[in-house]
Image (cartoon, rainbow, N blue to C red):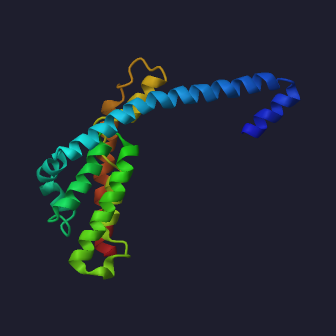
């Protein structure tokens, strides 16, 4: 698209306008990213504070019955449940960027727990727990879609949080559908 735009600009003799538009768009992109960095830093800091203050362990205890139903093989390991809950918490806050390293850590913890429980033979195999976790991570419930709200605010929306109720409906529906399909497939594949 950039090449086509430049070519058309050269053919029409408007290359200076195309260049100006390109520089203006680059400047707008930088300002947009700076606006997003503030909200991302705030929430990433919040996640670190909850982790250091031990709130992840409290969340793990509160949600243990739910995690036990979803992950019966690994729910007895506090570190693994805590890692899963940190990822789910970050996703609930709409922090996809912060949730990514937490999700990688949770996958490592799931694999560590499975290796301890079933031996090293499962260390390099894809497991039903990893598949379910990836589905939960992908279709996470968004309670506060902070990144989307920040993007709408940075783009000049008058009511950036008007999207809350539709996002809640969609994310809860997709979450239930994702887990249901995963559990059905689990019966046939594992």
> In the rendered image, which quarter contains the N terminus?
top right
| Residue at 73% from the left image edge and 37% from the top image edge | 2
| Residue at 57% from the left image edge and 30% from the top image edge | 29
Q: Is residue 147 left or right of residue 112?
A: right
Q: Position of residue 61 (x, y in %)?
A: 11, 53
Q: Position of residue 24 (x, y in %)?
A: 65, 23
Viewer-proximal residue, 100 or 189?
Answer: 100
Most extreme residue toward the front, as rendered?
A: 52
Depicted 179 relative to depicted 4: above or below:
below
Query: Visible in this render: residue 181?
Result: no
Total labels drawn: 0
Q: Is residue 157 left or right of residue 169?
A: right
Q: Position of residue 99 (x, y in %)?
A: 35, 48
Most extreme residue toward the top, as rendered?
A: 158
Q: Is residue 104 left or right of residue 18?
A: left
Picture quadrant of residue 136: bottom left
> In the rendered image, which quarter contains the C terminus?
bottom left
| Residue at 51% from the left image edge and 28% from the top image edge | 32
């Amino acid at each position: 698209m950039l090449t086509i735009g430049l070519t058309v600009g050269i053919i029409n003799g408007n290359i200076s306008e195309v260049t100006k538009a390109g520089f203006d768009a680059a400047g707008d992109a930088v300002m947009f990213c700076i606006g997003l960095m503030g909200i991302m830093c705030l929430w990433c800091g919040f996640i670190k504070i909850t982790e250091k203050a031990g709130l992840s362990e409290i969340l793990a205890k509160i949600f243990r019955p739910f995690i036990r139903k979803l992950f019966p093989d690994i729910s007895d390991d506090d570190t693994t449940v805590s890692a899963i809950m940190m990822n789910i918490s970050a996703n609930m806050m709409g922090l996809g960027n912060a949730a990514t390293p937490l999700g990688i850590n949770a996958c490592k913890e799931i694999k560590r727990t499975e290796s301890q429980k079933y031996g090293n033979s499962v260390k390099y195999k894809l497991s039903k727990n990893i598949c379910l976790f990836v589905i939960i991570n992908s279709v996470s419930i968004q309670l506060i879609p902070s990144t989307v709200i920040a993007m709408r605010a940075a783009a000049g929306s008058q009511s950036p949080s008007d999207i809350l109720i539709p996002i809640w409906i969609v994310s809860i529906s997709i979450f239930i559908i994702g887990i249901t399909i995963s559990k059905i497939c689990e019966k046939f594949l594992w």
